[in-house]
Image: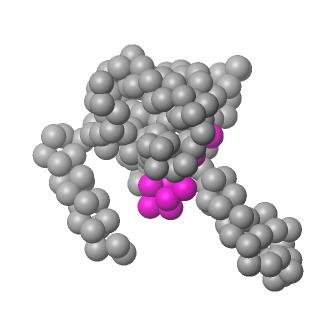
Amino acid sequence: MLFLSMGWRLPTRMGKSESEARSIEAWARRHAEMLDAGGVASGRGLDHSEDGTGIALNPKERLVLLLADGAYKSYDYEDVLDWRDREARAEMLAGGGLSAAWVNESASAVVADCADELSSLFVSVRDREIPMWRISMRDKMDRERWMEILREQINNGSAPTGAERATEIERHKHFNEKGT
């Protein structure tokens, strides 16, 4: 099985230890299991995976699938209460806007990396065990795209036709190629 979901990086290219690589492989298998269980085809634009977390939508069954901390669950659209994105900024992590000036260059880079890691999509659901899910999304465009996908799917409750979906994918490809 080939894992091609967005956001996944080969551990050997990142200089990860063997145990971290095994952990990433286990997470990739878990993500693939979630997609299979939810009837979602990987890489078709309705799934995202990053840093051990994931989200996928099955518009036909009206399901949202969420993955974090090695566990995944599916929820009916009606059980999704809220979603929001959060972009952590380095100034927030450094203790305030002016505090960032006190941090030397190497520490600033570490703080910026931490901010990237904390940028996420949060999904609130009707669930006593896990009422809030954090899906890691470092890329702001990914978060904005998922905010719109959730709005369209859950608020409108309708799946786009094949032609509409193909147009949307092409629009995103074109937009990403321009880099704006």
| Foreground of the two, 144 or 82 | 144
The quarter in which the C terminus is drawn is bottom left
Q: Residue at x 49, y 54 (%)?
A: 143
The quarter in which the N terminus is drawn is top left
Question: Does the rendering let one see residue 1?
Answer: yes
Answer with the quarter of the image where residue 43 lies: top left
Image spot of residue 105 (x, y percent)? 74, 78
Q: Residue at x 53, y 21 (%)?
A: 73
Check the image and report above or below for 85 versus 102.
Answer: above
Image spot of residue 76 (x, y percent)? 47, 23
| Foreground of the two, 7 or 106 | 106
View extreme (left): residue: 163
Residue 124 colored magenta?
no
Check the image and report above or below for 56 versus 112.
Answer: above
Image spot of residue 134 (x, y percent)? 62, 40
Residue 138 colored magenta?
yes
Question: Does the rendering let one see residue 77?
Answer: no
Q: Residue at x 86, y 68 (%)?
A: 95
In the figure, is residue 176 to the left or right of 9?
Answer: left
| Foreground of the two, 147 or 55 | 55
Image spot of residue 19 (x, y percent)? 61, 31
In the figure, is residue 44 to the left or right of 123?
Answer: left
Check the image and report above or below for 159 versus 26.
Answer: below
Answer with the quarter of the image where residue 46 lies: top left
| Foreground of the two, 8 or 163 | 8
Q: Residue at x 49, y 59 (%)?
A: 139
Chain part drawn in magenta: 134-144
